[in-house]
Image: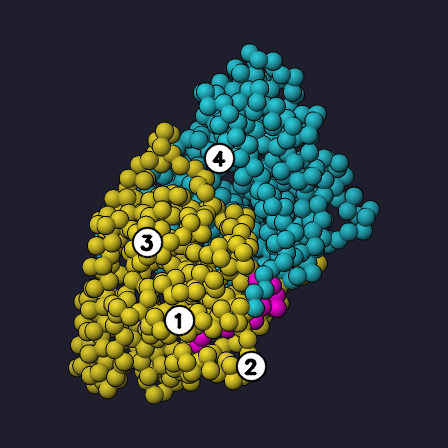
Chain colours: A yellow, B cyan
Amino acid sequence: MLKLNDNFLRLSDSYLFTEINRRTADFQRQNPDKKVIRMGVGDVSLPLTPTVINALHSATQEQADAATFQGYGPEVGYKFLKQAIADNYYALRNIHFDLDEILINDGIASDIANFPEMFSDDAKVLITDPVYPAYLDSNTMAGKEITMLSTTLYPTVSEQINHLKTTGYQPDIIYLCYPNNPTGLALTFAELGQWVEYANKEHAIILFDAAYEAFIQDEDVPHSIFEIEGAKQCAVEFCSFSKSAGFTGLRCGFTVVPKQIADGKLLHNWIRRVCTKYNGAPYIVQRAAEAALSKQGRAEAIENIKYYLQNAIILREGLAEIGLTVKPRQNSPYLWVNVGMPSWDFFDMLLSKYAIVCTPGVGFGKAGEGFVRFSAFANRQLTQEAVERLKNNK
Amino acid sequence: MLKLNDNFLRLSDSYLFTEINRRTADFQRQNPDKKVIRMGVGDVSLPLTPTVINALHSATQEQADAATFQGYGPEVGYKFLKQAIADNYYALRNIHFDLDEILINDGIASDIANFPEMFSDDAKVLITDPVYPAYLDSNTMAGKEITMLSTTLYPTVSEQINHLKTTGYQPDIIYLCYPNNPTGLALTFAELGQWVEYANKEHAIILFDAAYEAFIQDEDVPHSIFEIEGAKQCAVEFCSFSKSAGFTGLRCGFTVVPKQIADGKLLHNWIRRVCTKYNGAPYIVQRAAEAALSKQGRAEAIENIKYYLQNAIILREGLAEIGLTVKPRQNSPYLWVNVGMPSWDFFDMLLSKYAIVCTPGVGFGKAGEGFVRFSAFANRQLTQEAVERLKNNK
């Protein structure tokens, strides 16, 4: 007989961006003459850079000729891309991995949401709140016991860890995303070091989402958790070319599982999982990612990051015009704004009054209530237009 | 503390193709002058066709311009590709689906191996043996109760279903792969109809792997399980462009979950899973898949299929030269050969005597012992060279 996974019943039904799209579409129907500006979604707007485009064309041409055609590749990714990551991403920061420890993915979402499979059913999951919803949803689907830790109530890492110690709660898996989506907060070496120390003491695993590392400007903020001593004993890192090189539509990233964890068992099991349930990222996409890590590719990516960070500054000034002060977050494309009212009420107000779309903070967890997220990923012209609207219609 | 998923301990450790590669590499090291011909792996050798290549270049160019750049797409796939599948794949066979029921994947492997998540832990899984190993491995990782049904002992569908009825075993999930990997056997309308009738009676779900449908030549063999009446009540179908259009390195396919199953709950949950744990296939790849379904794309694909089927005929004649008779399987790129000895012994003999690599049948399940699989996917010249070696060194 049909036996469905009942854990799905525990998921909240309406997905954040679906609801945003529904309300935006309703508004547009009722106001067909208004031009809606979307300042909510975390999708890039700049096209792929010339170096990446050239690599795609060139790899496509290889696929047109039997002599150079590539069929099934290694499920864990091509060596050329693993080597580029080892050399041009990690070694630059004096971090060294065997190529086996680096696995190519199709973006962070799949790997980080599939990673709960690595752990037993009774593994306890800690998720900071607010955060990217896939951690909560994927662990809910897996029926795991989940604890949400409010970073609104406990803003500093010291307070967060003290709270855990005080309540006697001992997590087995800890999700961290820094620079954070949605708050934009980045952790310093000292702060991330506290988490690594705590995880090693508790024998917990940190799943570290580094999606926004390319935005980091501060010297005292690590790009990789492996810049922290002891992290190879407790951390798995998930990275992506989505935000660093505009790959949101191209889909490529990487997952690093250090062999030190559980005498290599976690790495062994993850490789086995990948080889069973995944067939690798497309060859042409892996060539594009390799190009994004070349000297020229990285230089182009940095220009794009600067563009988005400049957008964030423009947007912050605009929000100040309507009395919303935003903490400066110079390591992130996101502005996290305390709006002093329920998130969805502010969303509706901003949409109806300014025809601007933001992302309600409560969509990232209960602790996000009362906040909204603005994104600096729109193009410059739209960002400036949004600011003008805010200024002229206070 | 670290709580690993213990189900991984129950997996057989050495993956089939890893072991093949290891033994082949050993042989090559010991015989550096010998040219090894790989007739084992199910990977295509013909390059992507002109229509697909043009679509890739053209979509890549769109990604180079902000005006046409595509970032995040719908997790479930772009409408243009869903529509092409609805029109040019299903409607041609008089099968009709809402676009919601069709989800774009990155090849069958991921979706079919992730599908066990849809069911409760106590759902009983039936897998025909021999078959593609991912069904067994993914359900083992999920800790599900698995029964293997030997199609060597029970060669016909009637015998298989009778065996189930006799033993009183009632599966909740049934994996079927036809034309079969590795045996090449295809089911007629009447035979697949028996499975659909059985599944509906038992309220079981059939997970139907149609990876090799493009090879079907016989009129009385259905390409899709949905050509069978009643299948929309009990079947999920997994299709791929890998074998039909040479997408093994490009990664694209589709999964169809009919809304009739469990009043739409299975479809609803699957969409929720995809939107949480997947970010969609790359835009440029989906454009390539759309091109593969165009009139010209399909015409080019048919030429490639003919080429591989001709290889199969040449190879069958060659095997006959060394006394191995192979049942004609005109709907498949695979030859499934009873070698009258343990599979790995034959593998080693064939490698050492002819420098030809085949795939040991036991790698597809216990019921595959005593058989090996030959693939017709190598290029014509290598296929002919393999046949010459067999002829000249009996």
Do the residues at pointers 4 and 3 share their chain? no
Secondary structure of the residue carrying tag 3 is helix
The residue positioned 56% from the left and 51% from the top of the image is B113
Q: Is residue A56 above or below residue A193?
A: above
Secondary structure of the residue carrying tag 2 is loop
Q: Which residue is mark 3?
A: A91
Residue at far top of view: B392
The residue positioned 31% from the left and 80% from the top of the image is A337
Q: Which residue is mark 4?
A: B43
Amino acid type at mark 4 = Asp
Numbered disc in front, either 4 or 3: 3
Q: Is residue A322 above or below residue A312?
A: below
Q: Which residue is mark 1?
A: A193
Q: Which residue is mark 2?
A: A168
- Give the chain of mark 3: A
Amino acid type at mark 1 = Gly
- Give the chain of mark 1: A
- Give the chain of mark 2: A
How far apart, in angstroms, are the residues tagged by discs 2 and 4? 53 Å
Query: Which circle's residue, 3 or 2, is located before the other in the chain?
Result: 3
Choose between B229 and A140: the one closer to the eye: A140
How far apart, in angstroms, are the residues tagged by discs 1 and 3? 20 Å
Choose between B137 and B255: the one closer to the eye: B137
Q: What stretch of residues is rendered in magenta?
A: A119-129
Whether residues under marks 3 and 2 lie with C-beta atoms below 8 angstroms apart, the answer is no
